Image: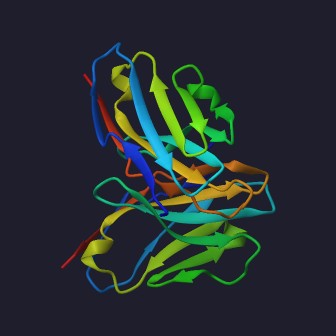
Amino acid sequence: AQKVTQTQTSISVVEKTTVTMDCVYETRDSSYFLFWYKQTASGEIVFLIRQDSYKKENATVGHYSLNFQKPKSSIGLIITATQIEDSAVYFCAMREGSNYNVLYFGSGTKLTVEP
Amino acid sequence: DTTVKQNPRYKLARVGKPVNLICSQTMNHDTMYWYQKKPNQAPKLLLFYYDKILNREADTFEKFQSSRPNNSFCSLYIGSAGLEYSAMYLCASSIRQISNERLFFGHGTKLSVL
């Protein structure tokens, strides 16, 4: 079974608007860590933001923020004031506290930001 | 320097021939990973080294080999490439003991098998 699921395969938005990308995860661990990465056009995968399961506050870094809904096993990525350069594939990922070694990825959401 | 370097960026291989991909990092990370990424799919963990200990995923156990002669360097070896090996191969590193530590990825090697 998929541990991390991203149902949106692609999203298109107009520049300077806000976009939300969905991600749900599955784990039995009480401690786990959630990440969002971005894959640029060159193929490089870049870390964006992280949420630790024991933290109630939603993480925020620059114009990225998270909507962590623990009861729903959901971790949405919100990008405000989108820019053309935000166009990329965004991956949600999870690491379980019982197994540091494995980072489970979702299949990604392709974001296109248009002028 | 917080980069992971991979060589080459692009690799062309013939079916049945061996392939060797190289990765290095200078962050003194104890763990190095190899992922396979195909279009429209999630990155798939192939194997990782924690220090000198190699761990290979069960479903790719026989397809990929690796070596880590020192802390900074890790290779991925395919003994006999098949068409299904065409993919982006991503190397990453991290400090295992920091549970919420992110992975640092290299730019990847795009392997095309013909």
Identity of the residue drawn at 47% across and 57% down: A7
Q: Is residue B4 among the parts visible in the rendering?
A: yes
Q: Is residue A111 visible?
A: no
Q: Picture coordinates of residue A53 (x, y %)?
A: 72, 70
- Horizontal side of B62 relative to A79 (left or right) equals right
Q: Residue at x 62, y 64 (%)?
A: A34
> Residue B51 vs residue B16: left or right?
right
Q: Is residue B58 left or right of residue A76?
A: right
Q: Residue A91: percent from the left, percent from the top?
A: 47, 59
For residue A90, what is the image quadrant?
bottom left
Residue at image x 77%, y 73%? A54
Q: Nearer the viewer, residue B17 or B24?
A: B24
How far across and down, in percent of the image, does residue B74 sit?
53, 38
With respect to residue B25, does B70 lie above or below?
A: above
Q: Nearer the viewer, residue A84 or A6?
A: A84
Question: Which residue occupies 64% across, 39% down?
Answer: B49
